[in-house]
Each structure stands twice: as structure tokens, then as C-alpha cells.
Amino acid sequence: AHPMSWLDELEARLEQQLEVFLRANPAQEVLLEEQEARDRQARLVGQRRQLQQQAEQERQALLQLADEIRRWQERVVKARAAGATALAERAEAHQQGLMEQGRQRWQHLSALGKSFASVERDLGELDWASFEAEQALEELRRL
């Protein structure tokens, strides 16, 4: 193994100094943890917003797809009524393709829903953690 570079050494020393400082000032550690929690919360809120936008786009696409599938269904019926079997079969094949797209979009929407639930859960846990941190800070102030 090669010796630690001066950068690694510096990093280790700074980390050690930070630990010593935080042990001497417990309130600072709580504040640091709070800041980390706020940063994480901001990230999660951004993720949640992004997931909501994606889900809305997916929903709109599904509505358009449903309309298109209905139109192709009408074409199939008209072609069959007119005795245009080959045309009806082509329209039916196209309609099947659209329905497959619809199934894939549903799956994607379902996955977005699961991701959203996960982000919501993480946000809930963060709220509880920050409540506990505030309680700890209050106790430290009373000492």
C-alpha cells in the first residue's frame, strides 16, 4: 500500500478537528444535522415535484392514447362492415400496437406512483427526525 497523500492526511486531520469541535459543542452537531436534513428535504421535495410532473404527462398521454384507440376501433368496425377484410386487419393490428403502448404507460405510471410513495415516506421520516433534533437542541439549551 502507498503512503497517504498529503491531501488524505489533511482531510483526516480536518475531520478529526471537526469531531473534537463537535464533541465540545454538542449544539453545533445538532445544527449540522439539521442543515443536512434541510438539504435532504429540499432534494426530496424537488424529486416529489418532478414525479408529479412526470405522472401528469403520463396521464395526459394515456388519455390521448385512449382516444386514438377508440378511433381505430371505429375504423375496424367500418372496414369490417364494408367487407374490407385486409384493411380491417391492418387497422386491428395498429390498434393492438396502441393498446400495448397503453399497457406500458400504465406500468410506468404505476412505477411513478411507487416512487412517489417512497419519497413521501422519506419526507415523513425526515419531519420526525427534525422534530427529534429540535427536542435535543432544547434539552441542550436547558443544561
Image (spheres, rainbow, N blue to C red):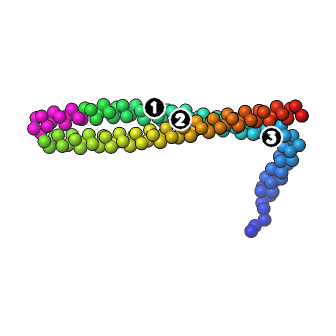
Sequence-first disc among 3 and 2: 3
Mark 3 lies on residue: 29
Give the Cα distance between marks 3 and 2: 32 Å
**Range of the magenta residues?**
72-84
Mark 2 lies on residue: 50
Question: What is the three-letter code of the residue carrying label 1?
Answer: Glu
In this rendering, position of residue 89 left or right of residue 121: left
The structure residue drawn at horizontal position 71% and vertical position 37%, both measured from the top left corner, is 129
Sequence-first disc among 1 and 2: 2
The kind of secondary structure element at disc 2 is helix
The structure residue drawn at horizontal position 62% and vertical position 39%, both measured from the top left corner, is 122
> Magenta span has 102?
no
The kind of secondary structure element at disc 1 is helix
Whether residue 43 is visible to the viewer of this picture, yes or no, is: no
In this rendering, position of residue 27 left or right of residue 63: right
Mark 1 lies on residue: 56
